[in-house]
Each structure stands twice: as C-alpha cells, then as structure tokens.
Amino acid sequence: MARDFSRKRLAPYALEWDATKHFPVAEMKEAGSLGMAAIYTREDVGGSGLRRLDGVRIFEELAKGDPVTAAFISIHNMCTWMVDTYGSEEQRQEWIPKLAPMDVMASYCLTEPGAGSDAASLTTKAERDGDDIVLNGTKQFISGGGASDLYVVMARSEGEGARGISTFLVDRGTPGLSFGPPEVKMGWHSQPTTQVIFENVRIPASRMLGGTDGAGKGFGIAMNGLNGGRLNIAACSLGGAQAAYDLALRYMTERETFGRKLIDEPTIRFALADMATSLEASRLILWRAATALDENDPDKVELCAMAKKFVTETCFQVADQALQLHGGYGYLHETGVEKIVRDLRVNRILEGTNEIMRMVIGRAEAARVQGK
C-alpha cells in the first residue's frame, strides 16, 4: 500500500514540489487517511498499532517517491507517538484522533539557536502562573514551522540541565506564538523550515505532556522519541538512495558510449555491485535496530544510533554515485538524481548529528568493556 501510494501520489510530483517549494498537505493528509500518520500508535485512539519494523519499511517506500514528504510524515509520527506514549488519557483522547488522519499536523520543537546537539542546555522557559504555563524562547530549524497545527515543545520548567525540562502541546493559533521567515536551504525545498518563537505564550497547565506527572520528564521524552526518529530518517535515506540507484541502473541500460551500452562495461558493473550491496547492508542494519526497539532490547539506543549513522552516510554515498554515473545529466534537475542528493545530505545532521551518534555508540561500547 505504501509503495503504491508513493508511486502514484508522490513520485510524479516531487520535482515540481521541489521547484515551486510546495508543501504537499493534501497528499500527506491522504497518507494519514491510509494509516501512515500514526503507524506505531495504539489502535484505541485511531492509530495503526504496527511495529517500528513496519514503520521503517513504510518510510523507505514513501521516500522512494519523495524523501522530503516522507521525512515530514516521520516527524509527525514521532509527535503522535509521544502523545500516545507519554500523554495522559485525556490528552490521548483529545489529540490522537485528530493527529492520526493528519487533520492536525504536528511539529517537534527541541533545537534552539544556541542548543543543537547539546539539547540539555536549552533555554526556552516554561513558567507556572496559576493554572497556566507561560512560554518564552525560540526554537530553530523546525520542520513544518508556521504550517503545522500543533507544536510539541520542550522547555525548561525548573532547574538546570536535562532534569529541568518538560514537554508541552501548543496550538498554532495561541496568542504570542509566531514564526520566522522560511529558511533558504540546500534541499528539503518542499518542506517549510522556520524558527518558532514564543513571546508570553500562555497555555493551560494541562497542556504539559503527561499532566502534572510530566514535570521534568521532557528531556527523556524527547530522547526516546529520537530513537524512532533516527530509524525513520535513516529509512528515508534508504528509500531515496534506492530511487537514485534505480534511476542509475535504468540509465546504464539505455546509454551507449564507444559503441556499447554502459551496463556492459565491467567498471560500471563493479560500481553497481558496490551500490547494491550498500543498500542491502543498510536495510539489514535498519531492520535489526527497528526490531531491537520493538523488543525493548537493552542495546536499542546504541543500535538506533548505529543504524542512523551507517545508513545516512552510506546511502548518501550511493545517491552521489548515482549522480556520477549519470554524468552531466545527473546534475540536471529534470533527471531527479540531484534533488535526491540534496535532500539526503541533511539526514546526516537531523535527529542528532552523526558525530553525536559516534559519541552514543562509543559510550555504549566503553560501558560494555567496563562492565557498566
């Protein structure tokens, strides 16, 4: 189903959306109506009740049609899962029936101008005022900024460091909430990215995720959400790279030079062999990590970091090689490969940079050796 939707509703329009900077809301809502906006959310509130393993397979297929649209649906899924997993029953019943079909679209607000990889140092404040919370601060690089209806916001409600952070649900129309101008980016042209600005934004205290029991738990909520986010963004890299490879393979069978088809050149076949192997290796490590997250494996955090690092780097190289195999035609927008290369590049930064992934993996390996 995901493959057919991607082929019919995303792939034919992806280049046009990129060129015109069109955010395909209608198509994403259609994906929501098919169950792809609440993939691993519980069924009692309208979720699909599937596994993380199902999710990465779905996102790979969506990304074959358009990695950018797939990535936003991934972010929306992360927000929906966070409400389902950490929200009170009242919050689940209020929000997820609207999030699951994407009648309400959600954005994830963690990064700030001065707090990227060091997310625990964020400075957006959440101050209690009677039965309300007042938010002040700025979030940076927010996908869907200004277009989404709901913002899942990490803000400092008390103290310093990770333990002072809580998570809040903020409507787009709340007074004091505003957005910066759309960022001009290398890729991801069909998805708006802006600052999200809070100036005395007043919300009911009941909008804290988890209710009164959620105070100070926001950093853990954000990090647990990122485990799945890392898998999904890796799946988007895999789908995009597979699409680029398929374009290159088709071109190699059609293009002739020096009196023979390129596919008959041994060096070309060697390149294709390496690319195909890289794609399959990426798929296997991604499925392994997704299974670990499904089973709550003790190594799930490390395996998710490994998958994110390996897949986003390896698949970017595959896409870049696909462009190279096209020669000058690969550099043209109409071919479709250069868009994939631009779109996949940011995945090595999103959901925790790959340098941070190395830190996560290295810390886990050191603890293993030290018996901790």
Image: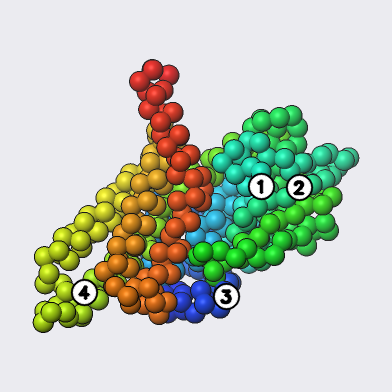
> Which image quadrant is residue 210 in?
top right
Find residue 22 and name its label. Answer: 3
Question: Which sits earlier in the primary sequence, circle 2 or circle 4?
Answer: 2
Report whether 143 appears left or right of 64. Answer: right
Q: Amino acid at mark 3?
A: His
**Residue 201: percent from the left, percent from the top?**
82, 51
Which residue is identified by label 4?
252
Pointer 1 local density, CA inside 10 Å: few below 14, some 14–19, many at least 20: many
Per the image, label 1 sits on a secondary structure element best described as loop
Q: CA distance from mark 1 to mark 3?
A: 25 Å
Q: Which residue is mark 1?
A: 112
Residue 268, position in %: x, y? 17, 66
Residue 259: which quarter of the image? bottom left
Residue type, mark 1 in image: Glu
Q: CA distance from mark 1 to mark 4?
A: 45 Å
Task: Measure the alpha-carbon separation of dots 2 and 1.
Answer: 9 Å
Q: What distance separates the C-alpha of mark 2 from that of mark 4? A: 52 Å
Instruction: Give percent across and percent down for residue 174.
Output: 80, 58
In this figure, which residue is indicated by the disc labeled 2?
137
Q: Nearer the viewer, residue 142 or 289?
A: 142
Can residue 96 be seen? no
Whether tag 3 and tag 2 are in contact, CB under 8 A, the answer is no
Looking at the rendered image, the disc whose residue lies closer to the viewer, 2 or 4, is 4
Q: What is the x, y in percent for residue 143?
A: 60, 59
- Marks 1 and 2: in contact by CB < 8 Å? yes
10 Å crowding of disc 3: few (<14), some (14-19), many (20+): some
